[in-house]
Image (cartoon, rainbow, N blue to C red):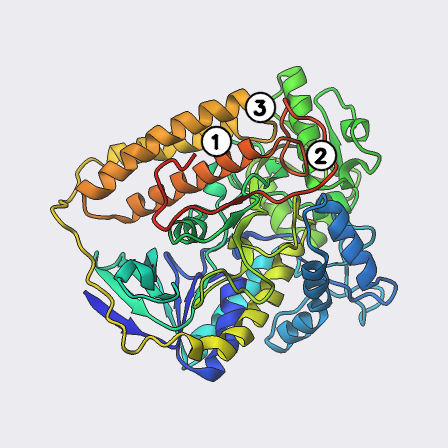
Amino acid sequence: MQTRDTDFLVIGSGVAGLTAALRLSAHGKVLVASKREASECNTRYAQGGIACVVDPADSMAEHITDTLQTGGGLSEESAVRAIVEGGPERIAELETLGVHFERSTEHPNDYDLGQEGGHSRRRVLHAGDITGQALSEGLLARAKADPNITVAENLLAIDVIPTGWIGLGGENRCVGCYFLDKNSGEILAVRSPVTILATGGLGKVYLYTSNPDVATGDGVAMAWRAGLPIRDMEMIQFHPTCLYHPDAKTFLISEAVRGEGAKLIDRRGHEFVYDFDDRGPLAPRDITARAIDSVMKKYGDPFVYLDISHRDAEFLQQRFPTLYKACLKYGFDMARAPVPVVPAAHYSCGGVVADVNGCTAMPGLYAVGEVASTGLHGANRLASNSLLEALVCGHRCADEAVKRRKENPVADITIPRWECGDAVSSNEEIVVEHDWNEVRSVMWDYVGIVRSDRRLTRARRRIRTIREEIRSYYKEYLVTADLIELRNLAAVAELIVRSAQRRKESRGLHYNEDWPETAAHARHTVIQDRPGGPLDAE
């Protein structure tokens, strides 16, 4: 087994990881590990933009208030304040790196700001309707041009390496990570005093999601197996408006469309969201997604409509060029008729407990971006706060890691070879595919937008059975990329179900028919199992 050394190991190539890597490169060698092409990450698919106070008429206090109100009592004010107040400096830095945001046609010195659900005013900066892609391409180009940064593609993380796992005494700390090199099929270890989880989300745990195939919850699963606390995993945000079309399973229609006046109507033409909230289509995502789900179930409809046909084609082509072309590709002209949409799993508000500097409970291990639970999002994420968090926390994490790396010496540590035992190659990929599909179907059917105690119990039982099969398969056969991702996906599914079962109320993104009221006191759901994790800890 090859062991590679680096000063800083960043697992993930989205905006959080790349922001950290670019800042770390001034202090040593950085290895950015991406399990597929480095450009394939959740960041790339973020259409809306970055929420940030740049308008003189806006204020930090208003952005903080909007975030706290949307967070349903679980957001932590100190974290919200630090991230919101850190935004303007990060936007200015992005522009020096060549990432440009749209300017007003009437006032070229001002930004063209969008408005999205939960925001009290326009404060969303955007690069057309492909903000995430613009960030991803700009940061990735800089990283690849940096002589101190190595971007390693097709390098899939298997497990982080705590000292307790390799027989060393003293405080349990992280000294690197085992990887599967998908190009060669070999296992390798990377040894580093700093390991940063920037692995993104977990949307693929659901049958219908806006996330790309890489979003399999790897970072959360690895941290849980290492014994770290995992928080608020039941808070899964479903984006209200994904295009309903058999060939467009992950195509998101940005919330910014509703910010420009789009209406949500049912198949009878009724603008139904006002029946649930006075803010109508600009209500926060938890309310909007549940409203759509309720109407679809009430009438047995497979979708609802998003209608912006009152705006002319010229405006739509200028404001949403990518969306407009994509809808035309699937046979829908946004300027002429309503577009069918459905909710889909979009974002995990919970994750590995970390502070705004990325620090976790284990020295040497950091978490930034969607994989982390910093206290910003709470029970529901305010639209376009995710890229803001990734930028601010990625930057802060780099500074913290530089200060603390000497506290975690690794030079004299020997990382044990990966043991395969009697494992053999498998020719039963159909088993992996079957379990993959079953996990996602169970989660969609039983742990979706609206839950119940009975559905959660069924989901827990079925996920446990699947995990038993996976554990047996993992021991008997040589690891493959599909098996590693399935193992992580099933672990994350169980964490979501266990968290949902613990919350005896409805709050934010978690709605349980058997517990419809919101408790007087907001409490986090925290799961922390012994390292290695029992198959079914409860």
Disc on res. 452: 3
Q: What's the CA distance linking mark 2 and mark 1? A: 25 Å
Q: Nearer the viewer, mark 2 or mark 3?
A: 2
State the image coordinates of residue 513 (x, y, percent, origin top left). 64, 23
Label 3 SS: loop
Q: Which residue is mark 1?
A: 443
What's the residue at 50%, 43% (across, down)? 203
Q: Which residue is mark 2?
A: 519
**Relative to residue 496, is residue 274 drawn left or right?**
right
Label 1 SS: helix
In the picture, residue 252 is in which quadrant? top right
Residue extending farthest to the top is 299
Amino acid, disc 2 = Ala
Q: Is residue 186 visible?
A: yes
Label 2 SS: loop
Q: Nearer the viewer, mark 2 or mark 1?
A: 2
Label 2 packing within 10 angstroms: few (<14), some (14-19), many (20+): few
Along the polypeptide, which appears first: circle 3 or circle 1? 1
Along the polypeptide, which appears first: circle 2 or circle 3? 3
Q: What's the CA distance linking mark 2 and mark 3? A: 17 Å
What's the residue at 65%, 71% (across, down)? 90
State the image coordinates of residue 48 (x, y, percent, origin top left). 66, 52
Label 1 packing within 10 angstroms: few (<14), some (14-19), many (20+): many
In the picture, residue 263 is in which quadrant? top right
Q: Nearer the viewer, residue 82 or 174?
A: 174
Along the polypeptide, which appears first: circle 2 or circle 1? 1
